[in-house]
Image (cartoon, coloured by chain):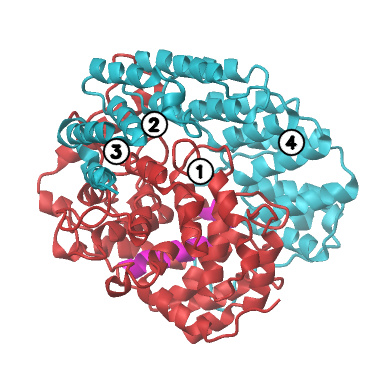
Chain colours: A red, B cyan
Amino acid sequence: SVWNMEDDGFPSHTSDEQKRCETRIQRERNKVVDLNQSLTLSREKHVAFLKKGFQTLSSGYQSLDASRPWLCYWILHSLDLLEDLPSNIGDVVFFLAQCQHPDGGFGGGPGQVPHLAPTYAAVNALLICGTEEAFNVINREKLYAFLLSVKQPDGSYIMHVNGEVDIRGVYCALSVATLLNVMTPALIENTGEWIGRCQSYEGGIGGEPGSEAHGGLSFCGLASLVLANQTQAIDLHRFIDWAVHRQMMMEGGFQGRTNKLVDSCYSFWQGGVYPLLDHLMLSPPPSHSDGDFLYIQRKLQEYILLCCQDISGGLKDKPGKSRDYYHSCYALSGLSSSQNNPRCAATLLGPPSNLLVTLIIPSIHLSQPPIHPVHNIRAVRATAALAHFSKLAPINF
Amino acid sequence: MSDSEDESDIQYVPFNQREEWKDVVPIPQDDGPHPVCVIAYTDQFSDTLNYFRAILKKDERSPRALEISKEVIALNPANYTAWYFRRNVLEALKSDLTEELAYVSKVGNSNPKNYQIWFHRRWVVEHLKDYSHELSYCAKQVEGDSKNYHAWAHRQWAIQMNGQWEGELDYISQLLTEDVRNNSAWNQRYFVITKNRAIPLTDDVIRREIDYAFSYMQKAPNNQSSWTYMKGLFLNRPYNSIPEFKQRIEEAKSKYVANAHAATLYLDILEKEATKESLEAADKVLDDLIKHLDTLHSKYWIWKKENVARLMQPQ
């Protein structure tokens, strides 16, 4: 089949944009002189970019002043996947302690009101740090109270008190509740049904009932259902049918929605649903040459490695865009996810040094839930946290 | 990286030079003893946030509290604490929300993808109980970015709150005429026909929608949106409830020989039919998809082949 956008001689803005994108991608491919070199993950450069950001950020980052736990998580998780954490990682404990709110949960910075997104990011960052101090910083009782305060009767969550409803909130809440052993039936009452209502006619999941199927929100929806053990709330076959068609023919990476452009962050949001589906026994037959998942893993890796690495370090959405910490995190997460198979050898494009640590523990794949692909932190971080917090008393209300 | 659009036309004056702020002791940000991810704030940013922290701590709900929240928002529109605080102050002061709607519209025009602004708008509109501007506001954002996710979600919200269904299908047709591949517009059409209780989903309505989708499909047969829409019409009803549909798709599949979408819709019809003959035919379509029509997604089609084979086995 033809691998480029077919506009049927009836162009529109969408097809023009897609063609522009494909042309740009082809230009990147044509630039390649030494393929092995181009496919090499530039570890040192990415580490330098990430470690710099962990220390200081330019004033341009004022727009993320309400998302500093996110910056901590994006940077630390990326460095963790590259197995090169900063020597002063323990500092993050002191900083995130300042972001924790007296009423429970974490805000986007010191003194900010608690919000589910920085709560998720802060907890993940603390678990990547993984020390006793990091675990002990988290006030579990207050955090549980915060989760209850944003839980809605219809099963959804608002992002903060007097804030917006969004399926991301469900994922953030259930992820931290699971890791910290504060999950209760109250936190998932009607949640499965609400997520079910967010599944659109396309098969993917949107931010609210009626909204368009979207990659990031679909990951949040499916991961939440796995955590709540309610995956029957959506039609999984329709979900897979939608998800699979989000891998772009020419680019190899994923788009977030039908008829939109490829973006490296969907390497995780879209690519990351496959380990979850695998856990639900929805996998291709064994001994397929391209790994255990229902998409072409090698092509995704080619897109990330060839098109999304910035020459100065860090990763980006697509050629022509600027590098940033968010895309570095999710491109690397997607890369790791696509490399590491639960049951067969790694699917590895490029030299052996490209292999990132796995998010999955293969040996316990079928007997335990894929807790790590759900939370998007390394397997060892999640298991250490679960071991620690499961010894603590569950919350009694 | 940052959006440096300045909402106020007023020149920034350091707070310690403002007479009306003389009584306030600014509170510097406390990142703790070992800061990380330290942002190099401008003087204006630090100064404004220091005074905001002081007002926040006192939970002061005054006109100057309203003013400073505006300045904080101008420096970082994603500061959700400032928006949350602002709502509390507006309520305490019983402020004129008509003015607030004008303000949030202005800020929204410069920051069309900001979550906080869209939510604040919902709050203002709900309290004003005035939905009359919402469709035109959303249309304006969509004009700039035809797939703005927030704009479409807001539009759906406004329509449901106010029952303003009339004219929506025409608006969608207008957008599809401009760009038949606008999947957000297709999604909106699905929203209207399923959520508007004035349109019961009778066979006639479904037929009309099929014709509609077909007319746009024929302009651009490789556009996935129109095919997915057709498939979506049969979410809660069997394909044979519209007996001629299967043949129509079969004909389309023959006409558009290289078109994976026609084949996949036909495949779905055959699978759902679930007879020995239909499943054997489905298996053949899958072979076509794997070998020629949609080789990129071949891992998926191979998996489907397994599923179909399982269905074909005697019970």
Tell me which numbered mark, 3 or 2, is placed earlier along the sequence.
Answer: 3
Of A107 and A359, the residue lying toward us: A359
Which residue is at a point 40% across and 75% down the rendered structure image? A381
**Residue to which mark 1 is pinned:** A199
The furthest residue to the front? B315
Assign a secondary structure to mark 3: loop
Give the alpha-carbon distance from disc 1 to disc 4, as whole Å.
Answer: 34 Å
Of the residues tagged 2 and 4, which is closer to the observer?
Answer: 2
Magenta residues, dominant SS class: helix
Assign a secondary structure to mark 4: helix
Magenta-tinted stretch: A61-81
The 10 Å Cα crowd at callout 2, few under 14, some 14 to 19, many 20 or more, is many
- State whether residue B223 is above or below residue B107: above
**Residue to which mark 3 is pinned:** A248
**Residue to which mark 2 is pinned:** A259
Residue B279 locus on image (x, y percent)? 26, 36
The numbered mark 3 sits on a residue in which chain?
A
Give the alpha-carbon distance from disc 4 to disc 3, as whole Å.
Answer: 41 Å
Q: Are marks 1 and 4 on the same chain?
A: no
Tell me which amino acid carries mark 4.
Tyr
Q: Are marks 4 and 3 on the same chain?
A: no
- State whether residue A128 is above or below residue A196: below
Assign a secondary structure to mark 2: loop
